[in-house]
Image: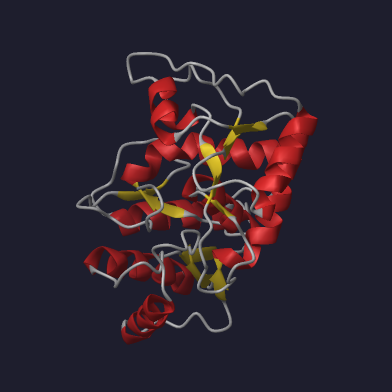
Amino acid sequence: GLNSPLVNKGNNNTRSNNESGPDKSSSLDFVRTIVAEDLKTDKWHSRVQTRFPPEPNGYLHIGHAKSICLNFGIAAEFGGKCNLRFDDTNPTKEEEEYVESIMQDVKWLGWDWEDRLFFASDYFEQMYEYAVQLIKAGKAYVCDLDAEQIRQYRGTLTDQGKNSPYRDRSIEENLDLFERMNKGEFPDGSRTLRSKVDMADPNLNMRDPIMYRIMHARHHRTGDNWCIYPTYDWAHGLEDSIEEITHSICTLEFENHRPLYDWFLEQLGIFHSQQ
């Protein structure tokens, strides 16, 4: 699913998503050029901040090693810093054992995150507040369609999607339902919070993607505090923004998620990394 680490899956072209030029043979050279240019123009006030954001749902593999060396290496080369951030938004798949294992592997590769160890779950409260902000702006709604119906309504690459019958709920009703979702009043899978983007967008990721799903599941760090959990697409741009990451280095398979990453940050008016 989408809630997976930003890793290279058989594709050697890694690039900063803010550029749309031809892919370079060397991903490091490509990213290095962008970072050097940003430093020259003082785009980020001479600051370089990257992150390695694995999901603690398994052991690391060679693709992760490349991402670790790229993110920590770019930061080291340009006098910057790299965060180690665990993208722990899916409690049913994640375990503390994997957190420990990943930390050991990063150290084994010779890198040090110093005092910059973070967890997506550190930001659950802030993410919830941002979601409420979008609901109040009329940019998010609670939807009662189940997963199969959402798939059907979504359409295909050749067919436009259809609006959910719940898309025009009032802001007041959405705020009430979202709060009750969070309190655990509804069963798993019965409701989602979706962003109100455009069901006719040619990019399927922009067709009112899910921001929160109901999961009565114990989280390895927050316990039973939450009955709703953020999706990867909603969470990962917020994490970069909260940590003020200057260069969010992604692999090309995430390219078609970039417009959504941008949309969320623009709607909220918060710090926007170069992706």
Q: Give the residue at x 39% y 40%.
A: 255
Q: Give the residue at x 43% y 55%.
A: 249
Decide: is 253 above or below 114: above
Which corner quadrant of the image does residue 136 belong to? Answer: top right
Extreme top residue here?
Answer: 159
Q: Position of residue 33 (x, y in %)?
A: 41, 53
Q: Give the residue at x 52% y 67%.
A: 218
Q: How many marks?
A: 0
Decide: is 207 above or below 133: above
Taking the image as shown, residue 138 lies to the left or right of residue 264, namely right
Q: Is residue 138 visible?
A: yes
* Colour pattern: secondary structure
Extreme left residue here?
Answer: 10
Which corner quadrant of the image does residue 39 belong to? Answer: bottom right
Which corner quadrant of the image does residue 28 belong to? Answer: bottom left
Q: Position of residue 180 (x, y in %)?
A: 70, 46
Q: Nearer the viewer, residue 169 or 81?
A: 169
Q: Is residue 48 visible?
A: no
Decide: is 150 above or below 245: above
Q: Nearer the viewer, residue 67 or 54?
A: 54
Q: Nearer the viewer, residue 31 or 140?
A: 140
Q: Position of residue 190 (x, y in %)?
A: 53, 40
